[in-house]
Each structure stands twice: as C-alpha cells, then as structure tokens.
Image: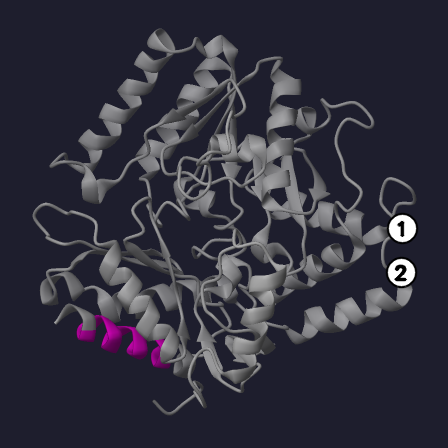
Amino acid sequence: MMGSIKIKTEIPGPRAKELLAKKEQNVPKGPFNTIQTFADKGNGALLTDIDGNTFLDFAGAIGTLNVGHCPPRVVEALHAQIDQYLHPCFHVMMYEPYIKLAEKLNSITPGNHSKKTFFLSTGAEAVENAVKIARKYTGRKGIISFERGFHGRTYMSMSLTSKVKPYKYEFGPFAPETYKWPYPYYYRSEGLKDKEHDLALLKRFETFFLSEVPPEEIAAVIMEPVQGEGGFVMPSSRFVKGVKQLCEKHGILFIADEVQTGFGRTGKMFAMEHYDVVPDLITMSKSIGAGLPISAVTGRADIMDSPNIGEIGGTYGGSPLGCAAALEVIQTIEEEGLIGRANEIGSLFTEKFSDLPLKYKQVGEVRSLGAMCAIEFVKDQDTKEPNKEIVQEILSIAHKRGLIVMSAGLFGNIIRLLTPLITPDEQLNEGLTVLEEVIAECCT
C-alpha cells in the first residue's frame, strides 16, 4: 500500500535479526515486545526501523505519545534544559520546572478546590504513592480496585491489578488489605440493561462492606475511568457517580488512575471529566511527558499534605527533563486543539468500523471514547466466547503490512488503538484502511 507506510524488507529484516540474536543472549525473556524489529527514527505517528521499514504507530508506546514521536517543541525544550542542568535532584536543590508543572497540573486537573502535586518517574510509582498518601490521611489500610483493572507491576500496584497472567502469576504473595470490586462490562452483562447492571453492582458493594470488610477500614478506592489493559471498557456516568457517592458516604478517598486516559486521549483533558466526578487524588504518567519518564500525583491540598517531610519522594522523581517535556506537552495539547482532535479520531474510527459486527460474526463490539478505540473479537456473537486466536492473526498480518497495533483485555481478544493525537487524516485513514483490510481477510 502506497503512502506513509514503506516496507522494504521482511520483518524482522537482516539488521533486526542480528540484534534479535544479541537480545536473546543479553536480555531476559520476560520483557514483552509487540513487533520484532528495532526503532531507528520516530516522527509524529511514524516509526522507521533499522532496516528502513516505516510503520504507522497506532500503539503510541502504549498511550505515551499523544503528541507523537519527537514533537518539535518538546525536543527544543529538552535541548534547552540539557544545556542548563540535568539532575540536581529536587530533594537536594530545587528547580523551577518542578514548581511550574505542579502549578499547571493543579490548575487543569478536575475540581476547583485547593490542590497540590508531586512527581515521580513511572505510573506504578504514582499509584504506590497515592496509596501511601491515602493511608496516611485516613489512618486506614484497605484499598479497593476493580476486576480487569491494571495499575502497574510493582508489588502494591501489582496487587491492585486484576489480570493474573502475565502480570501476577507466581509472583506472590501480594500486598495485604487489597480487595477487588466488579466493574461494569455492558457488552457482557448477561442480558441486563445498562442501568440494571450498574445498580446491581452498586448494591453488591454495599453488601461487600457487610460480608468482607467494614468501610471504616478502607482508605481508598482506585478506579481507571476507562479500563486500559482491561480492554477499553467504559463505565457509565451513573456507575462512576455511584462509586464516588459510596466513598463520600463512608469517608473513603476516591483515586482516579488516569495514567493511560489522561492528557486528551478520551476527548477530555482527563477522562474523569466525562462523568462529572471530581477525584480526591489523581495519578498520571504516560503521555504527560512525550516519552520522558515522569509521573504525578495531584490531589486535595489537605490530603497531599498529610505525609510529613521526607515520607514521600524519590531520587529521580520530577526530573528537570521530564518537567520540561511535560510543560511543552500540555501547551501543545492546549494550543493545537488536540482534545478536539481526539474526538475527531474517535468519530473517524466509529464511522469506519461501527458496522463490523454486522459484517463478521467474529466481531462482538466496536467501542471508543475519544481516541481510545477498541474492537472486541469473539468466536460466536451469541455465546460471546473470546477469540484471542484471530486477534493474534490480525496483529501479525498488520505488523507485516506496516501498521503497529496491540491487543488488550482479560482474554486478549481485543484490538486497541492508541493513535497519536497529532496523526493527520491521510495517515489515520491509511492505517485504518490497513486494519480494515486485514480484519476482512481474517474474518472472511
């Protein structure tokens, strides 16, 4: 196919095969790789590998590149920062970018209350520290997360994560005082209407406090406003508000995990804005820094001030480079209208794929919120049995044709798209057409 995609050789190509052999010798098998080649250059939504193949990247470093590969203003800001200083460590000598970014996040995150922010390096670290802060503030220990949720790979965040394989298998024991609640999945709600499904789950939560643990022992509930690794599963505003009301009723903090959903991905700066719910704490990472390792916890000032001096932090937290990148990312999103662009991408995706369940018995549902888009595959539309095998086939062929996409879901039966929000229509249509052709080939 002519266009942005340029495939010059097989994948992996000769140079990639050489590096793959060295990888086998020097890197453990544990880290997963979506596509079997190596990057040479990235620009916008394009990635060129070391053999000269150019791909459309619709995985976006798992939602990290909302502003694309090597955004010029971010690159320029990083060069300027490198010329000043690399890392004095905020805990040794403070620096202005940290303060400016905290001030900015306090102003753009949901809620008009007084807020404070501090920084770390990864999404998992943000989750770990949000839990620490919640426990310190409430004096309680219990943390509730949701089925199919993903919150990271460190021990507390892994304990809160739902999927066993590959994230938790044989890595236990896990952190105590962690509990799971069911999360709505309207496509698989066994015939219940959406409202009935929500009300049934909310009623179960009240029963949970009688049968499992009293609410007086729960410090916080942590929720992804759209489940990422769980399959881009989206709750209703009714459900999210119901959970928040339960938290308020029992003095439990509400933590929004916006690591994947934040910074314009869903057509709002933060996905929680879709539900008109203000969290007590919010965790952020991924697209905050255009690929630089930085994460944040923002929350009510009184909650954030509960840890004493020295009780939260980290050597590399809020690095000057990460802060400089994040400030430019936010400015890019605001000035280039990328929140509106996310909604345009979602509309184009829906227009192209919404009728797939009518065309192919292997497609169960097509769903999106802004540019957070997914297609769920089944073996039969009546039984809705997950079809992981066809997803793997589609991904393999798509990769060979120059389109990088990934799977998701508890059963691995969902194709997810995390297209950079700066992707122009020409490239977006090219990538979606490749995906459409591959699906037709595999489902016919």
Q: Amino acid at mark 1?
A: Pro
Give the dominant element type of the magenta stretch: helix, strand or loop: helix
The residue lying at 58 percent from left, 81 percent from top is: 50
Disc 2 on helix, strand or loop?
Answer: loop
Q: Amino acid at mark 2?
A: Tyr
Name the residue carrying label 2: 85
Residue 441 horizontal side relative to residue 395, left or right: left
Q: Which residues are magenta?
A: 429-441
* Residue 426 location, quadrant: bottom left
Q: Quadrant of the C terminus?
A: bottom left
Q: Is residue 315 above or below residue 12?
A: above
Q: Is residue 438 magenta?
A: yes
Residue 350 horizontal side relative to residue 226, left or right: left
Give the label on residue 88, or none: 1
Residue 315's x, y, as percent? 80, 42
Q: Is residue 174 above or below residue 427?
A: above
